[in-house]
């Protein structure tokens, strides 16, 4: 099984890239699945705060705060949840897993330490096309903890 981890700032095209790749794999009869780190964050936002799923400024800030709160409790909380899902998917037989919201170095380490085949990709989009450029959301730790020169594949 191949794990493809995709990083980049908000609005860079991480999910679009993943969807494109997954559609291609489907066209050649290869199983793939999306396992975002933020699945638990979004579930908590919906269940506890009534989040409507909209990633406007208020929604994105809510997600950032829940994510950070979880990381303060356990730095690997979201990565550990993702590995549980990946292990279940592996049994079912998906050949490729996409993680389209890699944001922290420890998340990359958790995945790389547990799985043999991990591809790390950084999406870089010109700043003028980034929807959150020059906002406080753009400078959140979840947007800045991975540099463009981390050592991607």
Image (cartoon, helix red, strand yellow):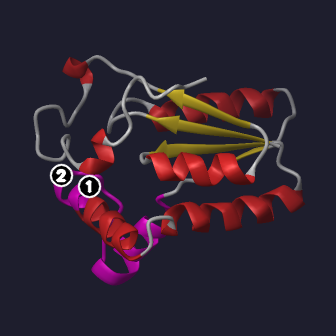
Residue 16 rendering spot, x and y as whole percentages: 50, 32
Quadrant where the C terminus sits is top right
Assess whether residue 57 is covered by the magenta stretch: yes
| Left/right of residue 29 with respect to residue 122 in the rendered view | right
Q: Which residue is mark 1?
A: 60
Secondary structure, mark 2, is helix
Q: Main secondary structure of the magenta part?
A: helix
Q: Residue at x 38, y 25 (%)?
A: 148
Q: Residue at x 69, y 67 (%)?
A: 84
Assess whether residue 36 is covered by the magenta stretch: no
Q: Which residue is mark 2?
A: 57
Residue 117 rendering spot, x and y as whole percentages: 77, 38
State the CA–CA distance, disc 1 to disc 2: 5 Å
Rendered position, 86 above or below 28: below
Quadrant position of residue 5: top right
Instruction: Please give the label number shown on residue 40.
Output: none
| Left/right of residue 73 with respect to residue 139 in the rendered view | right
Task: In this rendered view, identify the residue nearer to me: 54 or 142.
Answer: 142
Which stretch appears magenta? 38-61
């Amino acid at each position: 099984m191949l794990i493809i981890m995709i990083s980049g700032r908000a609005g860079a095209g991480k999910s679009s890239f993943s969807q494109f790749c997954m559609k291609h794999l489907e066209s050649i009869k290869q199983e793939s699945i999306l396992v975002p780190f933020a699945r638990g964050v979004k579930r908590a936002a919906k269940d506890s705060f009534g989040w409507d799923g909209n990633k406007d400024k208020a929604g994105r800030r809510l997600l950032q705060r829940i994510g950070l709160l979880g990381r303060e409790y356990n730095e690997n909380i979201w990565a550990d949840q993702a590995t549980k899902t990946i292990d279940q998917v592996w049994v079912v037989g998906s050949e490729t897993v996409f993680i389209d919201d890699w944001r922290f170095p420890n998340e990359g380490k958790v995945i790389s330490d547990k799985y043999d085949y991990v591809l790390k990709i950084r999406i870089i989009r010109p700043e003028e096309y980034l929807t959150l450029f020059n906002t406080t959301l753009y400078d959140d730790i979840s947007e800045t903890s991975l540099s463009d020169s981390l050592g991607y594949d």
